[in-house]
Image: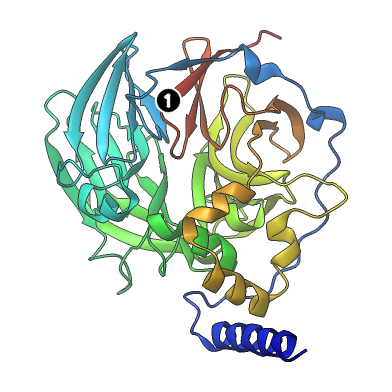
Amino acid sequence: MYLKWGFSAALLAVVVGIYLLPSPIDPEPFMFDKPPPLVGPLAINRRIHHGKRLFYGQLKGPESFTSDHEGNLYTGTVDGKLWQIRGEHLQFITQMGKNVSECGIPEYEPVCGRPHGVRLDSNGYLIVADSYFGLFRVHPQTGEKEHLLSNKEGVDGIPFKFLNGLALSQNGTIFFTDSSSKWGRRHHKYEVLETNHCGRLIRYDIVKKEAKTLLEDLYMANGLALSPEEDYLLIAETSIARILRYWLSGSKAGRKEVFVDNLPGYPDNIRISSMGTYRVGLSTTRFPGFFPPFLDAIAPYPALKRFIVKVTPLAAYSFLLKKHGLFLEVNQNGEIVDSFHDPDGSVTWAISDVYEHQGQLYLGNTDLPFLVVLTRERK
């Protein structure tokens, strides 16, 4: 009997001690709608199973893509490197930070860099949003870098913490997102768990070399896509499974509105297709079921989230995520019209980008050691 009481008292003391420890996060409550049913255009299929992996073990986390007029692809990886892909050949371009042997380890990302958004401007230069170092213009052949805007400099007196999405207008204006003014990329799971709104949309005038905040208080602002007429910009709010539309011109200029809400996963990059639809890569799925998705279930309870973070290592959250590859097609009205699935993750999962190039779709990811290419279906 005394042994049982002693064990209970010790357990209670441990729980109370953990509860009193400071938590690294300061979450806000949030209520998700129930995930949409997987019917109609969201019905589960195996269309990604037709894809194939390329450069296994050579590219880790090819997150975003762009291409030039000669058909070469460009991407950046978690080790801070920028690459050119010419057919079956991989060519190193430059290191965004320091090139040390530890590059690729999360703790060294602030040293090595992490290129996220990558786009080609009208002069043939790569515009790169590096999560840790800022905005760059890079010569694709020589690797020479020009620092346009540093994270330390930031905008409006607030340094950047996590540069992410990128879009270029025809006149050279650069739009990009700072996912958080609080957490860096290697702590992005904390950003998601907090469900805070510390993200921003920024415009950079490359001629005047001036930056301006267009939107703030965004929930983990991520991927961007300009409309074909460049009258509005789509912005992924990853942590709340939503995409916003921000009007750049017309009678609604300067206003934002919800474009599509309650997605079946957490949106990353948004890319326009040759058919005029938008393809949205989902970093993680959130499907309906007997139990709600983990992040949905804990979202309304800040105290619970504080406690979970104190007893769970950051790396452990990956084990709670379902390895189900999924990207969506969304029309100009914000309606989901199609979906591509890999239900068992046998080809890929955690899809960050869906880039159409020469009749194929290149599927990026956040930290897997390959990229996937899928032949685009004809309709």
Q: Residue at x 61, y 23 (%)?
A: 346
Mark 1 falls on what kind of element? loop
**Residue 198 seen in the figure:** yes
5 vs 246, nearest the viewer: 5
Image coordinates of residue 224 in percent, x first then y, are 50, 44
**Residue 228 seen in the figure:** no
Residue 279 lies in quadrant:
top right
Q: Residue at x 35, y 27 (%)?
A: 59
Is 20 above or below relative to 311?
below
Q: Residue at x 76, y 61 (%)?
A: 32
The C terminus is located in which quarter? Answer: top right
Image coordinates of residue 37 in percent, x first then y, are 86, 41
Is 173 above or below relative to 340?
below
Image coordinates of residue 165 in percent, x first then y, are 44, 46
Image coordinates of residue 323 in percent, x first then y, are 63, 36
Is 302 above or below relative to 69?
below
Residue 277 vs residue 157: left or right? right
Residue 92 lies in quadrant:
top left
Q: Which residue is mark 1?
A: 370
User: How is the structure coloured here?
Assistant: rainbow
Residue 93 vs residue 5: left or right? left
189 vs 203, nearest the viewer: 189
Name the amino acid, label 1.
Phe
Mark 1 Cα-neighbour bin, 10 Å: few <14, some 14–19, many ≥20: many
125 vs 133, nearest the viewer: 133
Residue 49 vs residue 224: left or right? right
The N terminus is located in which quarter? Answer: bottom right
